[in-house]
Image: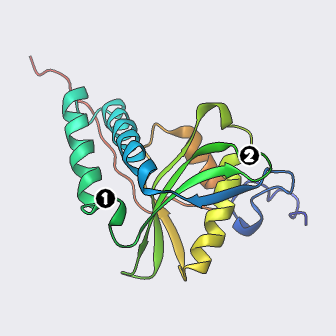
């Protein structure tokens, strides 16, 4: 299937934002043993993003990241409606990264992406788009009408990925550093 001239990459046809030549991935449910390492990695990555965005110093960012992350999964691996996956290359079964989503019921049935992580060596090879395509399929099977996410403004690579798959900005936080008043 080809897109009309000039429409590629604009997110106008999100169901075909994935080229036929992209690799195929599997979303394999994460096991309980893997979860503890995964959630610690999520906390660390989120803390770095908080610090890089200028919201907090390193120590405060780690405190906020820990509190925020553990707050949304109070029962850990067994927190209702949260789903954790290992992303694998379908052909080689190599582990590429992890995905954490939540099925939300209000205001409408949707999936929220809490974390999508691909290891550095697998980025830029089509695995992100392949993962998003697989997530589209999963969300539909779960009865979701939409997929939502949060991304930090400095994460330009992720923003490009999401836009190429039809995601649009629905809200935006902005900030300005005032510096010292002395």
Residue 43 location in percent, x, y?
A: 33, 42
Of 181 and 144, nearer the camera is 144
Farthest residue to the top: give it.
Answer: 182
**Residue drawn at 74 percent across, 40 percent down:** 125
Residue 18 vertical position relative to residue 152 in the rendered view, above or below: below
Position of residue 22 measured from the top left corner of the image (x, y, whole percent) = 80, 51
Q: Which mark is residue 88?
A: none
Q: Secondary structure at mark 2?
A: loop
Dot 2: within a 10 Å radius of its alpha carbon, few (fewer than 14), some, or many (20 or more) residues? some
The percent coordinates of residue 81 (x first, y second) are 39, 72
Rendered image quadrant of residue 135: bottom right
State how far apart marks 1 and 2 are (Cα). Answer: 31 Å
Q: Quadrant of the N terminus?
A: bottom right
Vertical order, 138 against 91 (above or below): below
Q: What colouring style does the render use?
A: rainbow
Q: Residue at x 39, y 81 (%)?
A: 105
Left/right placement of residue 150 relative to residue 75 reads right
**Labels 1 and 2: the sequence-earlier one:** 1
Q: Nearer the viewer, residue 119 or 105?
A: 119
Query: Disc 2 marks which residue?
Result: 126
Reading the image, the residue beneath label 1 is: 76
Proximity of marks 1 and 2: CB atoms separated by less than 8 Å: no
Residue at coordinates 36% horizontally, 60% vertically from top-left?
77
User: Which residue is farthest left?
Assistant: 182
């Amino acid at each position: 299937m080809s897109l009309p001239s000039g429409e590629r990459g604009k997110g106008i046809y999100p169901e075909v934002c994935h080229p036929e030549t992209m690799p195929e991935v599997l979303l394999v449910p994460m096991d309980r043993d893997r979860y503890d390492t995964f959630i610690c990695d999520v906390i660390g990555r989120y803390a770095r993003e908080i610090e890089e965005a200028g919201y907090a110093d390193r120590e405060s960012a780690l405190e906020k990241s820990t509190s925020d992350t553990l707050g949304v999964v109070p029962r850990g691996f067994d927190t209702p409606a949260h789903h954790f996956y290992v992303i694998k290359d379908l052909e080689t079964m190599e582990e590429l990264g992890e995905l954490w989503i939540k099925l939300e019921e209000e205001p409408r049935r949707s999936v929220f992406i809490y974390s999508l992580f691909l290891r550095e060596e697998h980025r830029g090879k089509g695995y992100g788009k392949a993962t998003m395509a697989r997530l589209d399929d999963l969300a539909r099977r779960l009865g979701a009408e939409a997929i939502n996410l949060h991304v930090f403004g400095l994460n330009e690579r992720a923003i490009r990925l999401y836009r190429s798959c039809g995601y649009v900005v629905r809200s935006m936080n902005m900030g300005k550093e005032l510096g010292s008043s002395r």
